[in-house]
Amino acid sequence: MTDIPADQPAASRPEAARPAAVFTRAGFGRGFRMATPLALSSVLFGVAFGVLARESGLSLGEAVLMSGTVFAGASQMAALDLWSATPSIVVLALATFAINVRHVVMGAALRPWFSRLPSPTAHFALWFMTDANWAMSMAEHRKGERDAAILVGSGVALWIGWMSGTVAGHLAGAALGDPRMYGADVVVPAFFAIMLTPLWPGWTRAWPWAIAAGVAVAAHSVLPGYWHVIAGGLAGSLAGAWADLRGRT
Amino acid sequence: MSGMLGLHATAAILVMALVTYLTRVGGFWLMSLVPEGGFVRRWLHHLPGAVVVAILAPMALQGGWAAPLAIAVAIGLGLLRRSALVATFSAVALVAVLRQVI
């Protein structure tokens, strides 16, 4: 891992000096190991999902199919709220979109890196993108990582945790207790906070982050789903880009 | 009953899976329509930090002391260059222990 200073804008590095994206077994392994704490938390959240899925009337096979193919916790939890004997597919599709639309901005941020991969590889890797391993991969990329398999390795670790948790939760039911007892609910905030440190732009350039936080908190109180991530993320990043352009001229 | 796949439920789940995959590749596709110019490159450079802040800020304000404490401990250990594994588990363990005590 080379140590490119976090506050150096990508634009200031000449195009030719940046190595092309790679996709290797070693990168997969790095991602898998780095995501271990998250995988353990996804076991616990998977248990919570499995328990709720059973209570909502999903069979074990249906809960496993959902965790295995959708692989997006918040939208799956929301689907359980909307579940019935014959759930409305249109309503489920809309709710899923409203919650997972934040992936669109996340995928956009991966474009400069992943567009250097063969298209099928990029499309395969994006299947494994979730909030946590995306944040981890972006933070590593800022530190000099170029191996896109880090997203897949970390995604597979999360997927295994999520699937085993789903099965355990559905089989054991409510007997496992509240995952909050083990602090499972703070794993994700703690991990995201660590991922912020390599992205820190320095005190004089931190104000776009304040805009992102303010807009996100305000939007969170009025908008459903995860639209606050879009609102805050766009506001903060556009402010930062605008400041860069003004600062240059 | 348990373990079986209902036809309607399976269709609903597969539609959810398709919608979710489209959100995962959607941004990647959309950015192919946008020329990778100066402003766009700067915008994409600022995007990860802003998105993580936007995810984190409402979380930090929810559910009492646990999330802010975990975030503070994690950032502190992150600044001390501890690994993500050590920092996450330290923050989580502290919250779990405090929950037993309080």
Image: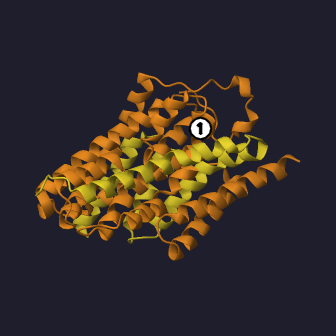
Chain colours: A orange, B yellow
Give the residue drawn at x 45%, y 61%: A99
Element class at badge 1: helix
Relative horizontal placement of residue B77, taking residue A204 as reference (left or right): left
Of residues A249 and A181, the one nearer the viewer is A249
Can residue B100 be seen from the camera position used here? yes
Label 1: which residue? A142
Quarter of the image holding residue A5? top right
Left or right relative to A176: residue B53: right
Tell me the quarter of the picture where residue B35 sits. Answer: top right
Q: Quadrant of residue B62?
A: bottom left
Q: Amino acid at mark 1?
A: Arg
Residue B68 visible within the image: no
Q: Position of residue B4 (x, y in %)?
A: 15, 53
Local crowd size for mark 1, using a 10 Å CA cut-off: few (<14), some (14–19), many (≥20): many
Chain letter for mark 1: A
Q: Is residue A234 above or below residue A244?
A: below
Q: Position of residue B17 (x, y in %)?
A: 38, 51
- Could you tell me which residue is drawn at 34 percent across and 64 percent down? A79
Nearer the observer, A237 or A191: A237
Q: Nearer the viewer, residue A198 or A155?
A: A155
- Where does residue A154 sit, x and y in percent of width and height? 39, 38
